[in-house]
Image (cartoon, coloured by chain):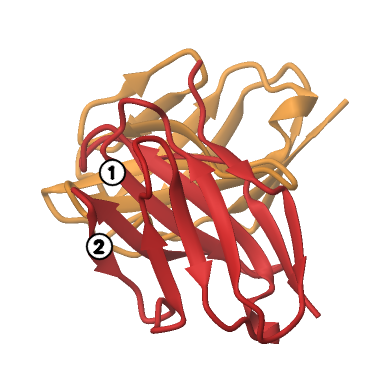
Chain colours: A orange, B red
Protein backbone atom coordinates (compact mmCIF):
# COMPACT_ATOMS: atom_id res chain seq x y z
CA UNK A 1 0.00 0.00 0.00
CA UNK A 2 1.17 3.51 -0.78
CA UNK A 3 2.61 5.65 2.00
CA UNK A 4 0.82 8.79 3.15
CA UNK A 5 2.19 12.03 4.58
CA UNK A 6 0.16 14.25 6.90
CA UNK A 7 1.00 17.28 9.03
CA UNK A 8 1.64 16.37 12.64
CA UNK A 9 -0.86 18.83 14.05
CA UNK A 10 -3.36 21.53 13.08
CA UNK A 11 -5.63 23.96 14.88
CA UNK A 12 -9.06 25.12 13.78
CA UNK A 13 -11.50 27.64 15.22
CA UNK A 14 -14.86 26.28 16.30
CA UNK A 15 -17.48 26.79 13.60
CA UNK A 16 -14.94 27.17 10.83
CA UNK A 17 -14.08 24.59 8.20
CA UNK A 18 -11.21 22.26 9.00
CA UNK A 19 -9.17 21.25 5.96
CA UNK A 20 -6.84 18.33 6.59
CA UNK A 21 -4.35 17.57 3.80
CA UNK A 22 -2.78 14.25 2.89
CA UNK A 23 -0.10 13.44 0.34
CA UNK A 24 -0.05 10.01 -1.29
CA UNK A 25 2.16 10.56 -4.32
CA UNK A 26 2.83 6.85 -4.94
CA UNK A 27 -0.84 5.83 -4.95
CA UNK A 28 -1.80 3.13 -7.47
CA UNK A 29 -4.89 3.03 -9.64
CA UNK A 30 -6.63 0.41 -7.49
CA UNK A 31 -5.94 2.08 -4.13
CA UNK A 32 -8.66 3.88 -2.24
CA UNK A 33 -8.15 6.83 0.10
CA UNK A 34 -9.72 6.27 3.53
CA UNK A 35 -10.06 8.70 6.41
CA UNK A 36 -10.52 7.65 10.02
CA UNK A 37 -10.29 9.58 13.25
CA UNK A 38 -9.51 8.59 16.81
CA UNK A 39 -10.93 10.59 19.66
CA UNK A 40 -8.99 10.14 22.89
CA UNK A 41 -9.45 6.68 24.46
CA UNK A 42 -11.81 5.50 21.72
CA UNK A 43 -11.45 3.20 18.74
CA UNK A 44 -10.79 4.53 15.24
CA UNK A 45 -13.95 5.89 13.66
CA UNK A 46 -14.56 5.61 9.92
CA UNK A 47 -15.25 8.97 8.26
CA UNK A 48 -15.20 8.63 4.49
CA UNK A 49 -13.39 7.03 1.57
CA UNK A 50 -13.01 7.50 -2.17
CA UNK A 51 -11.20 6.30 -5.26
CA UNK A 52 -11.00 9.28 -7.61
CA UNK A 53 -14.24 11.24 -7.39
CA UNK A 54 -14.95 13.71 -4.61
CA UNK A 55 -17.18 12.27 -1.91
CA UNK A 56 -19.49 13.80 0.70
CA UNK A 57 -21.40 12.30 3.58
CA UNK A 58 -22.98 13.55 6.77
CA UNK A 59 -19.63 13.84 8.49
CA UNK A 60 -17.26 15.30 5.93
CA UNK A 61 -16.21 15.87 2.33
CA UNK A 62 -13.25 14.26 0.61
CA UNK A 63 -11.54 16.11 -2.21
CA UNK A 64 -9.10 14.05 -4.29
CA UNK A 65 -6.86 15.82 -6.81
CA UNK A 66 -7.14 14.81 -10.43
CA UNK A 67 -3.74 13.08 -10.37
CA UNK A 68 -4.79 11.36 -7.11
CA UNK A 69 -1.48 12.25 -5.47
CA UNK A 70 -3.11 14.18 -2.67
CA UNK A 71 -6.43 14.64 -0.94
CA UNK A 72 -8.13 16.91 1.58
CA UNK A 73 -10.63 16.00 4.24
CA UNK A 74 -13.03 18.85 4.96
CA UNK A 75 -15.07 19.14 8.14
CA UNK A 76 -17.39 21.98 7.13
CA UNK A 77 -18.23 23.37 10.57
CA UNK A 78 -15.80 22.05 13.14
CA UNK A 79 -16.98 21.61 16.72
CA UNK A 80 -15.02 20.96 19.90
CA UNK A 81 -16.04 17.30 19.60
CA UNK A 82 -14.09 17.05 16.34
CA UNK A 83 -10.81 17.35 18.28
CA UNK A 84 -9.07 14.05 17.44
CA UNK A 85 -6.23 12.41 15.53
CA UNK A 86 -7.17 12.09 11.85
CA UNK A 87 -5.67 9.30 9.78
CA UNK A 88 -5.38 9.24 6.00
CA UNK A 89 -4.92 5.66 4.78
CA UNK A 90 -4.36 4.34 1.29
CA UNK A 91 -5.69 0.85 0.86
CA UNK A 92 -5.88 -1.61 -2.00
CA UNK A 93 -9.40 -2.87 -2.56
CA UNK A 94 -9.91 -6.19 -0.73
CA UNK A 95 -6.73 -5.72 1.28
CA UNK A 96 -7.33 -6.83 4.83
CA UNK A 97 -5.22 -4.53 6.93
CA UNK A 98 -5.57 -0.80 7.44
CA UNK A 99 -2.09 0.75 7.73
CA UNK A 100 -2.38 3.55 10.25
CA UNK A 101 0.33 6.19 10.36
CA UNK A 102 0.82 8.87 12.97
CA UNK A 103 -2.04 11.01 11.60
CA UNK A 104 -2.82 14.70 12.16
CA UNK A 105 -3.79 15.85 15.61
CA UNK A 106 -6.60 18.37 15.03
CA UNK A 107 -7.44 20.70 17.89
CA UNK A 108 -10.65 22.69 17.56
CA UNK A 109 -10.48 25.80 19.70
CA UNK A 110 -13.37 27.91 21.03
CA UNK B 1 -26.52 2.63 14.42
CA UNK B 2 -25.05 -0.87 14.89
CA UNK B 3 -21.66 -0.97 16.54
CA UNK B 4 -18.83 -3.29 17.47
CA UNK B 5 -18.73 -4.01 21.20
CA UNK B 6 -15.73 -5.22 23.17
CA UNK B 7 -15.41 -6.65 26.65
CA UNK B 8 -13.92 -6.08 29.10
CA UNK B 9 -13.00 -2.42 28.74
CA UNK B 10 -9.97 -2.97 30.96
CA UNK B 11 -8.19 -6.26 31.73
CA UNK B 12 -5.36 -6.59 34.24
CA UNK B 13 -3.41 -9.85 34.09
CA UNK B 14 -0.25 -11.28 35.62
CA UNK B 15 2.61 -11.95 33.22
CA UNK B 16 2.54 -15.52 31.95
CA UNK B 17 -1.22 -15.88 32.32
CA UNK B 18 -3.62 -16.49 29.47
CA UNK B 19 -6.07 -13.77 28.52
CA UNK B 20 -9.11 -13.79 26.25
CA UNK B 21 -10.44 -10.56 24.78
CA UNK B 22 -13.98 -10.63 23.49
CA UNK B 23 -15.72 -8.82 20.67
CA UNK B 24 -19.21 -8.82 19.23
CA UNK B 25 -18.95 -7.62 15.64
CA UNK B 26 -21.78 -5.92 13.76
CA UNK B 27 -24.35 -8.64 13.20
CA UNK B 28 -24.39 -8.99 9.42
CA UNK B 29 -20.66 -8.51 8.96
CA UNK B 30 -18.51 -11.34 7.60
CA UNK B 31 -14.95 -10.05 8.03
CA UNK B 32 -13.34 -9.61 11.41
CA UNK B 33 -10.07 -8.03 12.52
CA UNK B 34 -7.90 -7.40 15.55
CA UNK B 35 -5.55 -4.44 15.92
CA UNK B 36 -3.48 -3.20 18.81
CA UNK B 37 -2.15 0.18 19.89
CA UNK B 38 0.68 0.42 22.37
CA UNK B 39 0.43 3.61 24.41
CA UNK B 40 1.62 6.58 22.36
CA UNK B 41 2.19 4.52 19.23
CA UNK B 42 0.38 3.73 15.98
CA UNK B 43 -2.55 1.41 15.53
CA UNK B 44 -1.10 -1.89 14.25
CA UNK B 45 -2.85 -4.68 12.34
CA UNK B 46 -2.74 -8.11 13.96
CA UNK B 47 -5.03 -10.48 12.08
CA UNK B 48 -8.04 -10.79 9.79
CA UNK B 49 -10.58 -13.61 9.87
CA UNK B 50 -13.13 -14.74 7.32
CA UNK B 51 -15.14 -17.90 6.81
CA UNK B 52 -13.82 -19.39 10.05
CA UNK B 53 -10.18 -19.05 9.20
CA UNK B 54 -7.37 -16.55 9.34
CA UNK B 55 -7.03 -14.75 6.02
CA UNK B 56 -4.04 -12.59 6.88
CA UNK B 57 -1.80 -11.95 9.86
CA UNK B 58 1.06 -9.63 10.71
CA UNK B 59 4.48 -10.45 12.16
CA UNK B 60 3.16 -9.45 15.58
CA UNK B 61 0.62 -12.28 15.51
CA UNK B 62 2.94 -15.11 16.57
CA UNK B 63 2.19 -18.50 18.11
CA UNK B 64 1.16 -16.89 21.39
CA UNK B 65 -1.91 -15.41 19.69
CA UNK B 66 -5.02 -17.16 18.42
CA UNK B 67 -8.46 -16.09 17.27
CA UNK B 68 -11.75 -17.87 17.30
CA UNK B 69 -15.37 -17.35 16.43
CA UNK B 70 -16.89 -19.74 18.99
CA UNK B 71 -20.48 -19.00 18.04
CA UNK B 72 -22.48 -16.86 15.64
CA UNK B 73 -21.89 -13.62 17.45
CA UNK B 74 -18.55 -13.55 19.31
CA UNK B 75 -15.02 -13.13 18.01
CA UNK B 76 -12.18 -13.65 20.47
CA UNK B 77 -8.47 -12.98 20.69
CA UNK B 78 -6.46 -15.22 23.01
CA UNK B 79 -2.96 -14.53 24.22
CA UNK B 80 -1.56 -17.76 25.60
CA UNK B 81 1.23 -16.60 27.89
CA UNK B 82 1.20 -12.84 28.28
CA UNK B 83 4.35 -10.73 28.33
CA UNK B 84 4.86 -7.22 29.64
CA UNK B 85 5.10 -5.94 26.07
CA UNK B 86 1.58 -7.19 25.33
CA UNK B 87 0.25 -4.26 27.35
CA UNK B 88 -1.76 -2.20 24.86
CA UNK B 89 -5.22 -1.25 23.65
CA UNK B 90 -6.68 -4.04 21.56
CA UNK B 91 -9.29 -3.07 18.97
CA UNK B 92 -11.69 -5.38 17.21
CA UNK B 93 -13.17 -4.36 13.85
CA UNK B 94 -15.59 -5.82 11.35
CA UNK B 95 -16.73 -5.17 7.80
CA UNK B 96 -19.54 -6.43 5.66
CA UNK B 97 -17.33 -7.20 2.70
CA UNK B 98 -13.56 -7.15 2.27
CA UNK B 99 -13.67 -3.92 0.29
CA UNK B 100 -16.02 -2.09 2.67
CA UNK B 101 -14.94 0.18 5.53
CA UNK B 102 -13.92 -1.51 8.76
CA UNK B 103 -15.81 -0.42 11.85
CA UNK B 104 -13.97 -0.49 15.15
CA UNK B 105 -14.97 -1.08 18.73
CA UNK B 106 -13.73 1.10 21.57
CA UNK B 107 -11.11 -1.40 22.59
CA UNK B 108 -9.91 -3.36 25.59
CA UNK B 109 -7.05 -1.90 27.57
CA UNK B 110 -4.80 -4.83 28.51
CA UNK B 111 -2.36 -4.23 31.35
CA UNK B 112 0.21 -6.94 32.09
CA UNK B 113 1.80 -6.82 35.54
Label 2: how many Cα within 10 Å (few below 14, some 14–19, many 20+): some
Q: Which residue is mark 1?
A: B31
Residue B25 position within the rendered picture, expressed as x and y whole percent measured from the top left: 43, 36
Cα separation, mark 2 vs mark 1, equals 10 Å
Q: Nearer the viewer, residue A94 or B18?
A: B18
Residue at image x 68%, y 22%? A78
Label 2 chain ID:
B
Instruction: Say which quarter of the image contains residue B30.
Output: top left
- Label 1: element kind: strand
- Does A76 sit above or below residue A66? above
Q: Position of residue A100 (x, y in %)?
A: 46, 59
Give the image location of residue B71, x and y in percent: 36, 42
Q: Are marks 2 and 1 in contact (CB under 8 Å)?
A: no
Confirm whether residue A96 shows in the render. Answer: no
Q: Residue at x 56, y 40 (%)?
A: B105
Left or right? Give the position of B82 relative to B68: right
Label 2 sits on a secondary structure element that is: strand
Q: Is residue A92 above or below residue B39?
A: above
Tell me, yes or no, if residue A97 can be seen here. Answer: yes
For image coordinates 58% across by 18% down, the residue present is A76
Q: Is residue A19 above or below residue A75?
A: below
Total marks shown come to 2
**Lower position in the chain sequence, tag 2 or tag 1:** 1
Choose top left, top right, bottom left or bottom right for residue B97. Answer: top left
Q: Are marks 2 and 1 on the same chain?
A: yes
> Toward the viewer: A67 or A28?
A28
Residue B54: which disc? Answer: 2
* Drawn side of residue B52 relative to residue B65, left or right: left
Instruction: Give x and y (percent) for residue A18.
Output: 62, 30
At a point 31% along the width and 26% down the height, the residue shown is: B28
Dot 1: chain letter: B
Amino acid sequence: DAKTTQPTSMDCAEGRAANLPCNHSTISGNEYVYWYRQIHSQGPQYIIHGLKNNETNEMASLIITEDRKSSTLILPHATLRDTAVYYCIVRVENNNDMRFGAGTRLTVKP
Amino acid sequence: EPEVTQTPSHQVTQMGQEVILRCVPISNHLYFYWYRQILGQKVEFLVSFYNNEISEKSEIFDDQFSVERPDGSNFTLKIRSTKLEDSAMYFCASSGEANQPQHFGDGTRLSIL
